[in-house]
Amino acid sequence: MPDRSTARAGQAPAVTGPRDLRNVVLIGCAGVGKTTLAESLAHAAGSVGRPGRVADGTTVADHEPVEHQQQRSVQLSVLPLAWNGVKINLIDPPGHPDFAAELHAAVHAADAAVFVVSATDPVTAPTRALWRECAAEGIPRAIAVAKLDVARSSFEDILAACHNAFGLGPDTLRPLFLPVHHDGHPDGSVDLLTGHTYGRTEPLPDTAPARESLVEAISGQDDTLMERYLSGDPLDTDALEAGLRREVLACALHPAVPTSENGLGATELLDLIAASFPDPTERTRPAPECDPDAPLAAQVVRVTGDAYVGRISLLRLYAGTLRPDTRIHLAGPDHPADQDTEERVTALTSPFGKLQRPVPHAVAGDLVCAAKLTTARAGDTAHDPGHPVKLDGWTLPEPLLPIAVEAHSKADDDKLSQALTRLAAEDQALRLEQNPDTHQLVLWCTGEAHAEVVLDRLRTRHNVHVDTVEHRVALRETFGTAAAGHGRLVKQSGGHGQYAICELEVEPLPAGSGFEFKEHVVGGAVPRHFIPSVEKGVRAQLAKGVSTGHPLVDIRVTLTDGKAHSVDSSDSAFQTAAALALRDAAEHAVIRLLEPVAAVGILLPDDYLGAVLGDLSARRGRVLGTETAGPGVTLLRAEVPELELARYPVDLRSLTHGTAGFSRAHLRHEPMPAALAARFTGKD
């Protein structure tokens, strides 16, 4: 095991096998300093001249224009670092909740996690949820406490808060380093196992109590170490190092490291990752054996677009070795059922933020980029021809915020469809809908930040400009009372004319009944071969509506009488007469406007139940009930008009401070309140 006190930085080493690799994801909400820590780690490893810059002066992070404007990361980034003879693939996903799909992909691709918590803010509910998710997957975790140079609180107090927030048992969270303060700011640290100091060494804190607690936690699961500890025998550094690694891999101990924006903690954290985090062969989650000589088994983690290279797919290799100019098969939900798609791998590159560095091959356990895999989607499995394998994907957030758009110009309209198709292929959280009822093009996003990124990519990557318009829901009309209608079409303009007369009776049906057509014509007033024409004309008018232009539903139409001409009557004449009769009936009836209602399920902490119930009441929601979904968590079920849900993802996140989630599904249409319907009909 490498000595954690003697770090060696440099360029990424030649990876000879999976044991030379560490795949680590940084997890933290937006604003905690996660990306700043990633750049400090890259700087400490010698991969950048100063935080955020590589040797040629270009930026490390995969920034987009909107990212600069909003000062947040919007896309998963990978930084391969060399440290103590191993290659550390540092995966930095976005912290904003709108980009949870990227975060879940990053967690799935990693073998260990570093949770970044801010010394200035409490641990958020989404971070706590991710901690539980990693615990369920058996992913080893450490904690990096950021912004210690800003906060005026003690490192120990912050760890106590983390202990409570994550619901940890005794001896499971222990500091591995203690900060050394000078003039109230941390300027260095002390390794509790080795006594090695980093940065400023004066004045040194009293490390004895913290070291004793750490040694007890390391020795607790090892009878030999515990016996030596209790007997007073000194424990050598190698034994403690081995014990620490064993406890970290077993998720029995979560070491904590103090960090700050001046670089404190970067070297310490790299030492911890290289020495005590698992390599891909020690992965606990179900996957093929991590053998470079086995048939290829890989998974697409992310797909991005590049203006010069085209599509770039980030792959996590679980088995086998991938080389350029080889054939692979892709399997996933977007590929034909029971049929893989064959692609050819051209060049392979190692990602470094936005940069791509050519590599000759990639072995099991590594992360690598392949260009121009035209059918690849995030979550797809890549395997050798003749050796099929299926790797499980990850949880995707459901996009629930609708953004209706229109092309700004004819030139934009010509390019819009292709541009959106490419964006949807790259962005697994984006769903496209061409609504058949409202005829709107709708982009379903996870939130406002996600929508802003999608629109920005349309404009900057594809040079397509769109205008956002008000999202319309699919309303319906129905008859509130029975009525009769008369339709007469009599035209004579030389030659064959047009002649058809229809008498219809219309009556409402129960909600959800649809449409019924009957005929009670006596004496052949309407010839039998024209009766289907009458029904066809009625159905055409149903689609157009009779009052507000929305489809007409839940009615029974009966043809009772009519007249025909032996020469001038025709199929089209009776279709027109039937439509006229239906519109005439509407003039003598009460027309009701129907709105769609959604079944909504909301998962939220009990603390916010009252606020959410009050908000649902203001949205005309009907609460069906609640049930316990876990300690301190409630599942609330309700029925809410879809008109009230347009901005609900944004409002619910604000109302519950990002701790709640919800699902929605269309349930039925039901009558709209008269006061609200007047806004759509123009009638008071």
Image: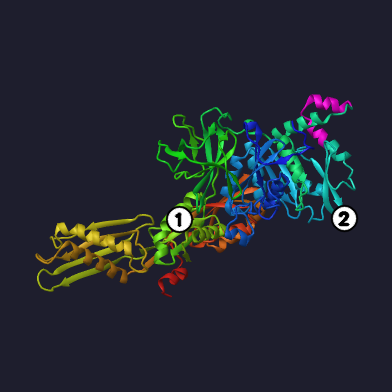
Q: Position of residue 539 (x, y in %)?
A: 28, 60
Can residue 593 be seen from the camera position used here?
no
Q: Which mark is drawn over residue 121?
A: none
The amino acid at mark 2 is Asp
- Labels 1 & 2 near each other (Cβ < 8 A): no
Residue at image coords 55%, 58% = 453
Q: Which residue is more in the foreground, 122 or 306?
A: 306
Residue 230 falls inside the magenta stretch: yes
Residue 228 quadrant: top right
Can residue 71 be seen from the camera position used here?
yes
Residue located beneath label 1 in the image: 420
The amino acid at mark 1 is Leu
Q: Is residue 561 left or right of residue 408?
A: left
* 74 is higher (above) or lower (below) than 339: below
Residue located beneath label 2 in the image: 183
Q: Which residues are magenta?
A: 214-231
What is the C-alpha distance between the residues marked 1 and 2?
A: 55 Å
* 271 is higher (above) or lower (below) than 546: above
Residue at image coords 28%, 61% = 540
Callout 1 secondary element: helix
Q: Which comes sooner in the sequence, label 1 or label 2?
A: 2
Task: From the image, give the main secondary structure of the stretch colored magenta.
Answer: helix
* 424 is higher (above) or lower (below) than 282: below
Callout 2 secondary element: loop
Residue 503 falls inside the magenta stretch: no
Q: Position of residue 651 (x, y in %)?
A: 58, 60
Dot 1 alpha-carbon crowd within 10 angstroms: few under 14, some 14 to 19, many 20 or more: many
Q: Position of residue 347 (x, y in %)?
A: 51, 41
